[in-house]
Amino acid sequence: MRTIMVGIYLLLYTIISIPLFLIFFLVGLINGRAKAVCSQKVVCNLGFRPLLFLSGVRVTVKGRENVLKGESALYVFNHRGFFDILAGYTTGPYPLAYVSKKEIGRIPMVSLWMKYMNCLFLDRSDIKKGMQTIQEGIELLKNGTSVYIAPEGTRNKNENPEELLPFHEASFRLALKSNRPVIPVALNNTDSALEKHIPWVHRAHIIIEYCEPIDVTQLERTEQKKLGQRVRGILAEKVKENQREVKF
C-alpha cells in the first residue's frame, strides 16, 4: 500500500512540477540564487516531506545546532540509499546542492529539479570533466551555497552499516580550496526504506546526525592530506553509536 501511495504521489508531483519549472525559469532570469532557494523549498515541502510521510519513514535529527546558518559548508555523508537525499534536504541548510553521479542527470524531471538547485553531476570516468565539476562545487561554496557529497563514491551495500567504503580524498578539495568548513553527516538505516526490499517501500526509522564542523583553515598540511581518513573515522564511530538507537 505504501508503494502504491508513493507512486501515485510521484505522478501528481510530476504534473505539478511542469508549471513550476516555467515559473522558476523566469525567476532565474532575474535572480539565480532565488531560483535555487525557491526550488529547494518546493522540492522539500511538496516533494520530500510528503514522501517521507507516505513511506512511513521517521527521521530523528541529532546535532542540528551544527547546521550552519548564513554560511556555506561541505557536508560529508555516508551513502546508504535514496532516502539519504530526503533526510539531508529536509534537515539541511538553504541553499544546498548535492554532488550526484552523472547517470542521475539523464533522468527527466528529477535532473531538471536538481539543476535548478545547482546540483552537480560528477563523471568519475573522465578526469577532466571530474575536475571541472569539483571547480564548480568550489565556486558554489565560495558564493554561499552548501554542498553535500558522499566521498565513498557509490552506495555502500555492506550488510554491516559500520563498515564504510574507502573515502576519495579528492572530494575534500571542495572545502580545502574554498576554505569552507567540513561537517560530517552520519546516516543510519536509510536503506531500510527501499534498497533492502526494492521495489517495495517500507517504514523505517532514520537517524541523521550533524557532527561538529572542522575548520580546514586551521589544519596543518599533513592533516589536510588525511582529512578524508579523519572524517571517515568520525562517521564510522557515529554510525556505530546511533545504530543502537534505530527503532525499526
Image (cartoon, rainbow, N blue to C red):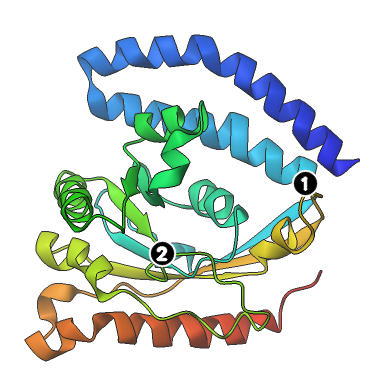
How many marks are shown on the rendered structure?
A: 2
Q: Disc 2 versus disc 1: distance between alpha carbons?
A: 24 Å
Quadrant of the image occupied by residue 228: bottom left
Mark carried by residue 44: none
Q: Say which of 72 and 202 sits in front.
A: 202
Instruction: Using the image, determine if residue 224 lies above or below residue 120.
Output: below
- Residue 211 in percent (x, y) is at 42, 74
Q: Is residue 69 visible?
A: no
Q: Amino acid at mark 2?
A: Ala
* Residue found farthest to the left: 221
- Does residue 172 sit above or below 198 in this rendering? below
Look at the numbered disc 1 and give the secondary structure of its residue: helix
Residue 229 percent across, percent down from the top left: 32, 86
Q: Quadrant of residue 84?
A: bottom right
Q: Which mark is residue 150?
A: 2
Earlier-in-chain disc, 2 versus 1: 1
Instruction: Name the disc covering residue 55, or none.
Output: 1
Name the amino acid, label 1.
Ser
Q: Position of residue 198 (x, y in %)?
A: 76, 54
